[in-house]
Image: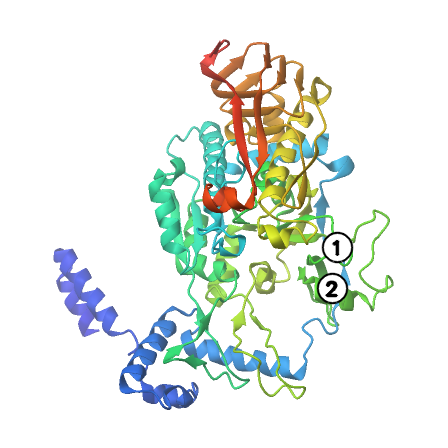
């Protein structure tokens, strides 16, 4: 009271009063943890300091203090208390899905008669386009490319060699194209669509460097928010005793579910909701395909008032992909959530189907999760506020003995971003949107050696092929019978085979949706399988016959055109060439693009003629 009275007297000196209040608030912060506190309940970490020198004790103590400050959900104390409960459950073999009855959840399947090219899909796109001005984006980009043989961060990998655009630049281009549409629609030329990026200790500085070196790929600095994920303490036994090695606390990643805590800590869902924004798209580092169908997905979210909408794919039974299920307990309470593939079959054993089997479609009735998620911001802000951003965690210790008395190696708590529905209430609607894989999923997660042994390969070549195939598909859908593109053929590089034909790159500035692309095709289009086509700008195509390489940039209408030239090709490289001559983005592929002859066309704004 005395302090407030002083501040009131100093009110005319505003800055002074604010400074006093700030200093007072800082004094109110709890004192840092001491060694004595850590050795007693509820921490019980006396073992940490045993056998350490004074210097090492000080170092460990400082590390634990830093962890205590950064760990969400009650700091170190909260983390250890949750860990003890979860570790006991793991030892007792508690099944998180015990007593749950699985059903197919509510959602929309935008495939077949409801897929791209149909009237119903077009209507969803139109609804979604109206939502773009209220949409925010979050890239979960904590990954390094080391496992791929790439020395940098994964968003710095070239997505396809035809245009040479990295994944980071491709994402920026999509957001800028959505933003340009939203500005035109709202007549607000200052409107920015925010992008939050979750980084890790390994990737943060590299992400900053990539953005700075490329001027944020056209995005403004004010619309990009970087959120660094911290590591969590590793635990050595079921009593949640923290592991220490060589005088340092062992730490491990907490999982991509931390994105919710980071969003909350930065106050973003609440801020965005207060600004009138409605939706948040979470996407991952090497999957650009969902942006092609984002407008339709937003349309589904808006129509159904989903607080969380999982973008999914048709799932083959037994496939190592989680399934979205509606789970109902004995009291009638239901939860729509992803069930991991290794838990799905046991869960379905008690149903009439007898397990994870296909329905009449040939696929599982439970849609396959790809971790592309759309959240309703208003509800998200409230749900994260209630838990401090924590989504329910789990622990997966590797037991060293049958009695489950010790671990093979230290474990830690983990969390997954798709477990957000566990924070929701009974009135919150959670659902899914299913699309063909070509419209929403690819990834780069395997190096060349591992990719050759796996199906799908999920490597740089397969992802590049998926990007071309999606663009080809969009062009065909946009033009219908007016577009004729020669089918692709198999290509093989270093034991990895993919279908690659015409290498078509449609930058987002050409069209943000299938409906918008339909307006850009006015004539007959014929493209050979050896061709390369890049369109970068608000371009309208009249008759075009292409057998070679053509790049069109700018805004305007392209006059009828026939292009025939030697073009370009993808050329296989030897191991020696890869190791000694070419940069990392080529090394992880095993091939390069060889340009022989390319025609470049620059359109003037509103022009109907080409300037070569």
Task: Provide residue 295's location: percent of width, then percent of height.
Answer: 59, 37
Q: What element carries label 2?
A: helix
Quarter of the picture containing the N terminus is: bottom left
Residue located beneath label 1 in the image: 366
Q: Is residue 302 visible?
A: no
Q: Which mark is residue 536?
A: none
Residue at 48% across, 40% down: 166
Task: Provide residue 592's location: percent of width, then percent of height.
Answer: 54, 36
Toward which corner of the image does residue 325 lie, by quadrant? Answer: bottom right
Seen in the image, is 548 located left or right of residue 39?
right
Q: Is residue 565 visible?
A: yes
Residue at 47% across, 13% down: 606
Seen in the image, is 19 located left or right of residue 413?
left
Is 509 situated above or below 579? above
Toward which corner of the image does residue 180 lie, by quadrant? Answer: top left
Q: Which of 574 and 385 is in front in this view?
A: 574
Instruction: Count the labels in the image.
Output: 2
Pointer 2 with pointer 1, Cβ within 8 A: yes
Residue located beneath label 2 in the image: 344
Label 1: how many residues lie within 10 Å, few (<14), some (14-19) or many (20+)?
Answer: many
Task: Provide residue 195's location: percent of width, then percent of height.
Answer: 44, 45
Residue at 44% across, 31% down: 183
State how the image is colored: rainbow
Is 12 situated above or below 516? below
Seen in the image, is 231 located left or right of residue 19?
right
Q: Nearer the viewer, residue 460 or 605?
A: 460
Q: What element carries label 1?
A: loop
Label 2: how many residues lie within 10 Å, few (<14), some (14-19) or many (20+)?
Answer: many
Label located before the other in sequence (2 or 1): 2
Task: Provide residue 467's location: percent of width, then percent of height.
Answer: 60, 37
Please identify the residue farthest to the front as the structure is shown.
576
Marks 2 and 1, how far apart at CA: 10 Å
């Amino acid at each position: 009271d005395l302090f407030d009275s002083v501040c009131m007297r100093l009110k005319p000196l505003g800055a002074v009063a604010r400074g006093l209040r700030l200093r007072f608030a800082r004094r109110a912060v709890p004192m840092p943890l001491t060694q004595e506190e850590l050795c007693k309940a509820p921490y019980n970490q006396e073992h940490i300091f045993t056998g350490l020198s004074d210097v090492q004790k000080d170092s460990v103590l400082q590390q634990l203090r830093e962890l205590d400050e950064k760990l969400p959900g009650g700091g170190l104390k909260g983390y250890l208390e949750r860990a003890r409960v979860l570790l006991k459950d793991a030892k007792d073999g508690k099944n998180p899905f015990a007593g749950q009855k699985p059903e197919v959840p509510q959602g929309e399947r935008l495939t077949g008669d409801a897929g791209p090219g149909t009237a119903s899909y077009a209507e969803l796109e139109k609804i979604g386009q109206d939502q773009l001005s209220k949409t925010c984006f979050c890239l979960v980009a904590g990954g390094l490319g080391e496992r791929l043989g790439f020395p940098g961060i994964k968003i710095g990998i070239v997505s396809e060699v035809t245009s040479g655009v990295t994944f980071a630049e491709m994402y920026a281009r999509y957001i800028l194209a959505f933003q340009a549409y939203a500005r035109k629609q709202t007549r607000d030329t200052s409107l920015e669509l925010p992008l939050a990026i979750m980084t890790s200790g390994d990737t943060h500085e590299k992400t900053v460097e990539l953005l700075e070196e490329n001027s944020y790929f056209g995005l403004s600095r004010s619309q990009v928010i970087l959120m660094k994920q911290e590591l969590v303490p590793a635990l050595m036994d079921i009593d949640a005793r923290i592991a220490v090695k060589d005088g340092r606390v062992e730490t491990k990643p907490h999982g991509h579910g931390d994105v919710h805590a980071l969003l909350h800590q930065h106050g973003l869902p609440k801020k965005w909701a207060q600004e009138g924004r409605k939706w948040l798209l979470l996407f991952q580092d090497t999957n650009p395909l969902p942006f092609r169908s984002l407008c339709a997905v937003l349309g589904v979210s808006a129509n159904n008032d989903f607080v969380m909408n999982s973008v999914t794919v048709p799932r083959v039974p037994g496939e190592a992909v989680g399934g979205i299920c509606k789970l109902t307990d004995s009291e009638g309470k239901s939860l729509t959530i992803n069930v991991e593939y290794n838990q799905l079959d046991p869960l379905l054993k008690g149903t009439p189907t007898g397990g994870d089997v296909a329905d009449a479609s040939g696929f599982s009735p439970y849609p396959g999760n790809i971790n592309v998620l759309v959240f309703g911001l208003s509800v998200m802000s409230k749900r994260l506020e209630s838990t401090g951003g924590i989504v329910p965690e789990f622990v997966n210790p590797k037991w060293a003995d049958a009695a489950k008395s010790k671990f093979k190696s230290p474990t830690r708590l983990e969390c997954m971003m798709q477990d957000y529905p566990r924070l929701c209430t009974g009135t919150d609607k959670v659902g899914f949107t299913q699309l063909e894989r070509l419209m929403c999923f690819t990834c780069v997660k395997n190096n060349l050696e591992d990719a050759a042994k796996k199906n799908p390969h999920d490597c740089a070549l397969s992802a590049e092929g998926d990007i071309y195939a999606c663009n080809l598909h969009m062009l065909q859908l946009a033009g219908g019978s007016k577009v004729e593109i020669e089918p692709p053929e198999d290509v093989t590089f270093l034991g990895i085979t993919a279908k690659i034909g015409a290498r078509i790159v449609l930058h987002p500035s050409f069209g943000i949706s299938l409906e918008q692309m339909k307006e850009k095709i006015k004539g007959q289009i014929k493209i050979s399988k050896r061709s390369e086509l890049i369109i970068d700008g608000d371009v309208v195509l009249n008759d075009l016959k292409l057998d070679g390489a053509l790049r069109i940039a700018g805004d305007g209408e392209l006059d009828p055109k026939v292009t025939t030239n030697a073009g370009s090709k993808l050329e296989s490289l030897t191991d020696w060439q890869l190791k000694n001559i070419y940069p990392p983005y080529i090394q992880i592929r095993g091939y390069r693009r060889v340009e022989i002859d390319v025609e470049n066309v620059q359109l003037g704004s509103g022009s109907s003629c080409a300037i070569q």
